[in-house]
């Protein structure tokens, strides 16, 4: 699969290690590309308006506006004030998840047993990044899971299954306002969302 060139000049290019957090400002008009370097890696994603972080990504508004649980090319990611924050301008996979949530010590314990409580989680990563900007647990909202596969059955049952990505596949997001993007390169090892082996991802910003 050939990935289209990014528009403009590359302004930021960083490898995010397996299991690590990442935070970066993306200005209006710039494009963020997330590259799944080795394949089958979930990327948990939050964003906040740079001007006022009380405005942040809203899964509810986004799902309601597009009338679909899954994010595809052309999907507009809305804030809790109903304003466009970013648009998915290109994706190498069919869709991305809005409802699987972020793993935490509590959810790991509930799903996989008490022995997993001390394992690193996406909630830990989000808190690690957000605290640098003065945000805490109350500032965390329902997140996007790029490259993660959470099918919804006819009876409403959810499951976390093997991801739908492969090495080198991408998703591109154009900022519609100045945003602060916060990512957890998911550390989960108890379900197949990362192929039981978390790997690095690459983040590029161009404009």
Image (spheres, helix red, strand yellow):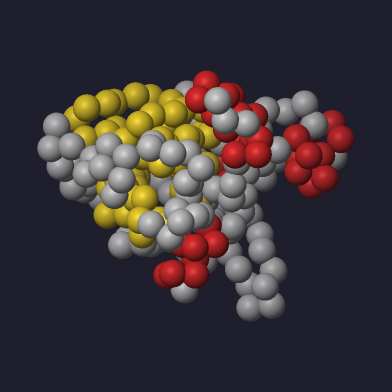
Residue 175 image offset from top left, x and y in percent: 30, 46
Residue 54 image offset from top left, x and y in percent: 51, 42
Residue 123 visible within the image:
yes
Residue 45 image offset from top left, x and y in percent: 49, 42
Q: Which quadrant of the rendered structure holds the C terminus?
A: top left
Residue at x 13%, y 37% (from the top left corner)? 8
Image quadrant where residue 38 sits: top left
Closer-to-camera residue (11/203): 11
In this image, 54 relative to 188: left or right? left
Closer-to-camera residue (61/38): 61
- Vertical placement of residue 52 versus 84, above or below: above
In this image, 202 relative to 206: left or right? right
Q: Residue furthest right?
A: 114
- Vertical placement of residue 202 versus 82, above or below: above
In this image, 27 relative to 155: left or right? left
Closer-to-camera residue (95/136): 136
Residue 157 image offset from top left, x and y in percent: 69, 69
In this image, 52 relative to 27: left or right? right
Residue at x 53%, y 34% (from the top left corner)? 184
Residue 145 visible within the image:
no
Residue at x 60%, y 68% (from the top left corner)? 152
Q: Residue furthest left?
A: 8
């Amino acid at each position: 699969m050939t990935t289209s060139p990014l528009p403009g000049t590359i302004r930021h290019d960083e490898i995010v290690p397996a299991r690590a957090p990442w935070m970066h400002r993306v200005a209006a008009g710039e494009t963020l590309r997330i590259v799944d370097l080795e394949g089958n890696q979930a990327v948990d994603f939050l964003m906040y308006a740079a001007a006022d972080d009380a405005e942040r990504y809203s899964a509810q508004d986004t799902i309601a506006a597009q009338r679909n649980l899954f994010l595809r090319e052309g999907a507009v990611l809305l804030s809790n004030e109903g304003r466009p924050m970013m648009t998915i301008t290109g994706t190498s996979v069919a869709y991305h998840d809005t409802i699987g949530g972020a793993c935490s010590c509590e959810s790991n314990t509930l799903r996989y047993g008490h022995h997993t409580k001390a394992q690193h989680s996406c909630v830990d990563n989000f808190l690690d990044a957000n605290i640098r900007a003065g945000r805490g647990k109350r500032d965390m909202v329902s997140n996007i899971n790029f490259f993660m596969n959470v099918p919804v059955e006819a009876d409403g049952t959810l499951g976390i299954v093997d991801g739908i990505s492969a090495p080198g596949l991408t998703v591109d997001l154009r900022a519609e306002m100045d945003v602060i993007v916060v990512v957890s390169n998911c550390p989960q090892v108890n379900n197949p969302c990362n192929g039981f082996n978390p790997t690095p991802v690459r983040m590029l910003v161009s404009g």
